[in-house]
Image (cartoon, rainbow, N blue to C red):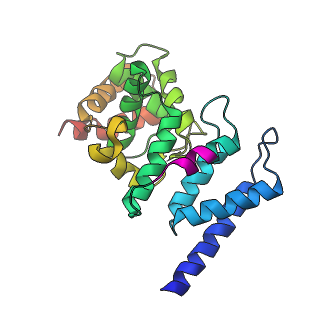
Amino acid sequence: GAGTRESTMRDIHKFVHRQLSSSKDDADPLDDETKATVCNALTDRSDGLFQWAAVACRFILDPSKAGSTTIERYNKLMSSKSQEMAVTSHYDTLYTTVLSQALDTQDSVAMDRYRAVMGLILTAFEPLSANALGAVYMHGFHSGNAGAEHDVATILRPLGSLISGAADPDSPIRPLHMSFREFLRDSKRSKAFHIESYIHDRLALACFRIMNNELTESSATVFPTSLAYACRFAIRHLM
């Protein structure tokens, strides 16, 4: 009812204000008047969707490309228009804006890395940390070539507003919201950012390579996360 929606909007306003006020970016602060304007506008634009407000705040407050300011990212987000106010359209506009800021769709190398890394994140049977994801990516896409695991960070860093765990190499990486996973899987919605298919074959290959390299008689009693994952799920990825 109207009362419930008003209460939700008040809660979103408090949440956004708290996020804007707790920003640690001293080099790019918002003055109080601008903060109030941004807070009110984001609350109205959220249309009562808490998750939209959460992603929007993360995007605005967390630089994804060098040279952009907080207010420029806010203006970019607010200038994007949904053709309809359906929930999916609301999210689609937000996700497309964030991904467009983070990725150059004309850069084939970057886009191949994006599809590989996001494909692994969406396909893994349980969330992998950035470190484990790096090992799986290296063995699944680069034949174990040392250094390739660092490619993963070039994708995770700018997508910090859409995935959780990106800032900590040992935290599980997950899409921040189920709607982002659904968006990526639907080619009509995500277009250039679509993640086409599950890549169980790559994950199976990576798992067997990790086990072959790391399962030795001198293996430690505590396995690296990537090896523990490989031992548990290698066969399942083949099924």
Residue 170 at x, y percent in the picture: 56, 39
Given the current orientation, which residue lies at the most extreme top position?
A: 145
At x 28% / y 28%, what residue is drawn? 202
The secondary structure making up most of the magenta span is helix
Region in magenta: 75-81
Q: Can residue 29 be seen in this view?
A: yes
Residue 11 at x, y percent in the picture: 63, 72
From what the image shows, is residue 112 above or below residue 38? above
Q: Is residue 173 visible?
A: no
Looking at the figure, which quarter contains the C terminus? top left
At x 49% / y 31%, what residue is drawn? 155
From what the image shows, is residue 144 above or below residue 229? above
In the displayed structure, does residue 107 sit left or right of residue 195? right
In front of the other: 20 or 83:
83
Q: In which quarter of the image is residue 237?
A: top left
Residue 78 at x, y percent in the picture: 57, 51
- Whether 76 is among the magenta residues is yes
At x 50% / y 48%, what residue is drawn? 80
At x 66% / y 41%, what residue is drawn? 72
In the displayed structure, does residue 147 sit left or right of residue 70? left
Given the current orientation, which residue lies at the most extreme left position?
A: 239
- Whether 65 is among the magenta residues is no
How many numbered discs sit on the rendered protein? 0
